[in-house]
Amino acid sequence: MTRITRTVGNPILLVVALLAVWLPTGSAELTVDKGQLVILDANGMTTKSHEFSTLTPSSAPTLELNDESTLKATFEILEKTSTDQAGSLFSPHQVTLLATGVDTKLHWAAAVKTRSKGKAKWELDLGRAPTDFLSLSRKGEVRLELIIGDISAVHAPLQLNLATLKIPKNLLLEYPYWDTKDGKPPSTLELEKHYIQPELKWTFQPPRKKDNPVFSLAFVVIAVSPWIFLLTAWSKISQNTIGGFKLLGAPKPSTLLFTLTMVSQEALILTYWARLKLYQYLPLAFLLCFPLILCGRTALSELRIRRKISPISAGRITSSRVFSSDSKNKNE
């Protein structure tokens, strides 16, 4: 057992030792070198210049700008380790220039892209500067800082104070400044989306006014009039048929079943209007359609046979009316 442990343990210790030698130990340091902050005029000539570096830190100077000034910053980012004290060019995860109003403490950030594995360049033309930058300070004093960070835990973040800028008063804007036609904040602004919204007030439909009873009665008469005409005509026609065709006579089973299915269908519709949902009504209505169709076909076929046996003719009705009128004249 001891031999097996030694045989397995020695390779494991060897791998651990190799990893300890191969993996870098300690933390690396990020530095800024060959940094230069330049102010250019309208012709591209340098009017003021300031060099900055983490190796030779200096107090941030105050730089005055005019309407046609262009601010330009160039620098290199180096990574220094215990084995490489001279440092090598390194491209970090994030490089940002942070502008802060001295009196208002408002911030404006600009991302700086690194090229050639660690060389960075940034420019800002005051004639085309964003409104957020020009509205940072009421006095026109803005502090410019360089912030460098990397996603790796090996590198500590770096912050370097570059200079204090003095913006001309004719370029200063009030905060907040909205570059819109009406001067109001845009609807797409995140602040407006998540700010306190007005209270929601529910509005309900006003109660329905009662209809005029005269109009209601008139429409009831219009709706009932076909049924009144049907009952009246049925009683007249049934008196002049052979064998009789009474409305309230004993119906056939098929006719009775058809009438019951019709009544059940109407009752189901009324129940659906009152309390049922559509998905509850449709299956029941579909099931009732089958007996309704079958009973209807049977009832109509039997009714056709009864009409053939006891036909209704206009001549018989006319002759019966003439006969009844002659009998009345004779009696008179």
Image: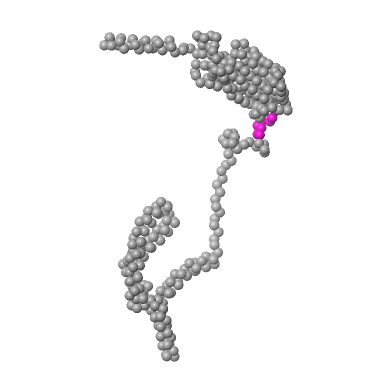
- The answer to which of 144 and 313 lies nearer the viewer is 313
Question: Measuring 40% from the left and 61% from the top, which residue is drawn there?
Answer: 266
Residue 272 position within the rendered picture, expressed as x and y whole percent measured from the top left: 42, 56
Magenta residue check for 157: no
Question: Measuring 60% from the left and 38% from the top, which residue is drawn there?
Answer: 187
Q: Quadrant of residue 192?
A: top right
In which quadrant will I find the C terminus? bottom left
Magenta residue check for 173: yes
Residue 89 position within the rendered picture, expressed as x and y whole percent measured from the top left: 55, 14
The answer to whether residue 264 of the structure is visible from this angle is yes
- The answer to which of 79 and 186 lies nearer the viewer is 79
Say above or below: 147 vs 321: above
In which quadrant will I find the N terminus? top left
Residue 185 position within the rendered picture, expressed as x and y whole percent measured from the top left: 63, 36
Q: Quadrant of residue 128?
A: top right
Q: Quadrant of residue 3?
A: top left
Question: What span is in magenta?
Answer: 172-179
The answer to whether residue 166 of the structure is visible from this angle is no
Question: Measuring 65% from the left and 27% from the top, which residue is drawn there?
Answer: 133
